């Protein structure tokens, strides 16, 4: 938690999050993280990986934090009787991880500030969900430090999907 707060403050101050870039097998990182999360949240997670081995130069520990934050948010804000779907895809340029849940849509006005430090949506506060408003800030900060992108799509009909796109090689 202290590390998360320090990193959120670095992001707020305009500093980047330091990374330890090394060869990383993202499919193994995702599977390991989901195994750990299943111990706490039950068998709600479903990994769909049509790409097999997904290798690149990334910070494996940083990407574990990204996966944890997105998956835990999907548990907190999604319907309890539906699966949380994680997809892993790749092409020559890089890899994409998406986390999808069914639940209430994120209001359009909240989408604009969703990744801002210490920002909690009105629906999260009204719904009684606990949090500090730093998880998605960390997701964006870690993704940005990898020179990647993160996007969110949310509607009542289709649920919510966060997409993290990473270049194959995040070394400077």
Image: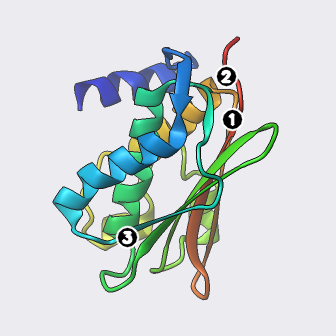
| Label 3: how many Cα within 10 Å (few below 14, some 14–19, many 20+) | some
| Residue 133 is at least partly visible in this image | no
Cα separation, mark 1 vs mark 3, equals 25 Å
Q: Are marks 1 and 2 in contact (CB under 8 Å)?
A: yes
Residue 111's place in the image compared with 141, above or below, is: below
Residue 98's place in the image compared with 84, above or below, is: above
Secondary structure under tag 1 reads loop
Percent x, y for residue 127? 31, 73
Q: Nearer the viewer, mark 1 or mark 2?
A: 2
The quadrant of the picture occupied by the C terminus is top right
Towards the viewer: 53 or 109: 53
Q: Residue at x 54, y 52 (%)?
A: 114
| Label 2: how many Cα within 10 Å (few below 14, some 14–19, many 20+) | many
Towards the viewer: 23 or 66: 23
Q: Which residue has dot 2 on it?
A: 170
Dot 1 or dot 2: first in sequence order is 1
Q: Which mark is residue 148?
A: 1
Q: Residue at x 32, y 66 (%)?
A: 76
Dot 1 or dot 3: first in sequence order is 3
């Amino acid at each position: 938690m202290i590390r998360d707060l320090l990193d959120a403050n670095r992001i707020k101050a305009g500093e980047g999050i330091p990374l330890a870039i090394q060869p990383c097998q993202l499919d193994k990182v995702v599977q390991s993280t989901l195994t750990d999360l299943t111990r706490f949240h039950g068998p709600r997670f479903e990994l769909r990986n049509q790409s097999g081995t997904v290798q690149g130069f990334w910070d494996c520990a940083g990407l574990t934090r990204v996966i944890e934050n997105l998956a835990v948010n999907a548990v907190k804000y999604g319907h309890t009787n539906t699966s949380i779907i994680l997809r892993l895809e790749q092409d020559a340029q890089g890899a994409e991880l998406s986390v999808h849940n069914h639940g209430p849509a994120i209001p359009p006005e909240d989408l604009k500030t969703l990744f801002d430090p210490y920002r909690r949506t009105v629906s999260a506060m009204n719904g009684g969900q606990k949090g500090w408003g730093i998880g998605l800030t960390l997701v964006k900060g870690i993704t940005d430090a990898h020179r990647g992108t993160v996007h969110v799509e949310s509607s009542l009909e289709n649920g919510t999907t966060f997409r993290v796109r990473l270049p194959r090689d995040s070394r400077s």
